[in-house]
Amino acid sequence: MMRFSLHHALIVVFLLVVSARPALADDVEVDLELVLAVDVSLSMDSFEQKMQLQGYVDAFRDPTVLRAIETGLHKKIAVVFVEWGGMEFQSVKVPWTLIDGEASAEKFAELLGRRRLTALPLTSISTAILFSAALFEDNGFKGDRRVIDVSGDGPNNQGVIVTRARDVVVKRGITVNGLPVMLRVGQAPGFFDLEKLDIYYEDCVIGGPGAFIVPVHEEKNFANAIRRKLIREISGAPAKIMRVQAAPWKAPPRIDCLIGEKLWNEWLGYQD
């Protein structure tokens, strides 16, 4: 009962926060408000974390990403970088930053490059989504689109049911995209590894108009995947790997969206 109440409370708190105030007249108008929500749970080894972080650093220095920003109506975006693990472990590591050209993009990339690697317990995608969504409020920006970009290498195993968190956020007009990290697929699987992580992200994590995933299957494609994903998010262009879920709560999943929680309980020795 307490667990259910805590989960419910997280959503209630989120709804209260996002209803706090309308956009102010002096908010900076941008084409996109983007939360980069990056998994730093213990399942992400140091090599994966280094590649992931460097991929974002390189992307914000990439001329094609800068050109995508320049093609927008306002020619500027706002970005914040979040690291997350379990329910109690989400934090802003690089605050909201206006990117309107090469100089500001380089500053953001430099701040990212200074990040030290972190290892946090458990995996709460749902809490990361709710935490990220609350960051849009009172951030000083007014975006034509609001997007949460979730990257990770495993399913949700703690916190609110991930589909519930996704649905409440999508109903607020926020799109959730995904970058499932699948470098270990085809290798000897670990206990918590999910072979169909891309399907899990499509059916259980992403949502909103034009929501899409860009899976990472090989080390050499990590940086390119991040760059392509950012370009699509900035430009709003359709993606080949895309699942539009205008009403994701009605779409029957092809995979058990509670698989992470069930694996965690099995590992702990709990029985249904």
Image (cartoon, helix red, strand yellow):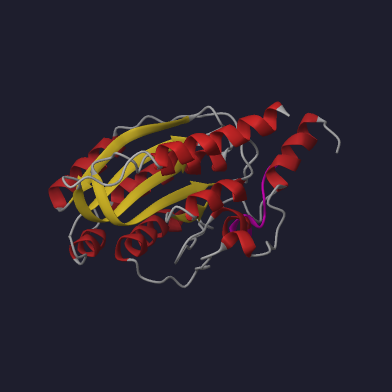
Expressed as whole percent of the image width and height from the top left, the position of residue 53 reads 38, 42
**Residue at left offset 56%, top offset 42%:** 126
Residue 198 located within the stretch drawn in magenta: yes
Residue 105 visible in rendering: no
In this rendered view, identify the residue nearer to me: 229 or 5: 5
Of the 4 image quadrants, the one containing the C terminus is top right
Q: Tag count in the figure?
A: 0
Query: Which residue of the protein is positioned furthest toward the right in this rendering?
Result: 271
Q: Quadrant of residue 265?
A: top right
In this rendered view, identify the residue nearer to me: 201 or 1: 1
Residue 154 located within the stretch drawn in magenta: no
- Dominant SS type (magenta): loop
Q: Quadrant of residue 122?
A: top right
Q: Quadrant of residue 248?
A: bottom right
Please state if 218 lies on the left or on the right of 191 as rendered.
left
**Residue at left offset 49%, top offset 61%:** 213
Question: Looking at the picture, does residue 235 appear above or below residue 139?
Answer: below
- Which range is magenta? 190-199
Residue 62 visible in rendering: yes
**Residue at left offset 59%, top offset 58%:** 198
In this rendered view, identify the residue nearer to me: 169 or 255: 169
Expressed as whole percent of the image width and height from the top left, the position of residue 166 reads 54, 50
Of the 4 image quadrants, the one containing the N terminus is top right
Expressed as whole percent of the image width and height from the top left, the position of residue 66 reads 21, 59
Expressed as whole percent of the image width and height from the top left, the position of residue 127 reads 53, 38
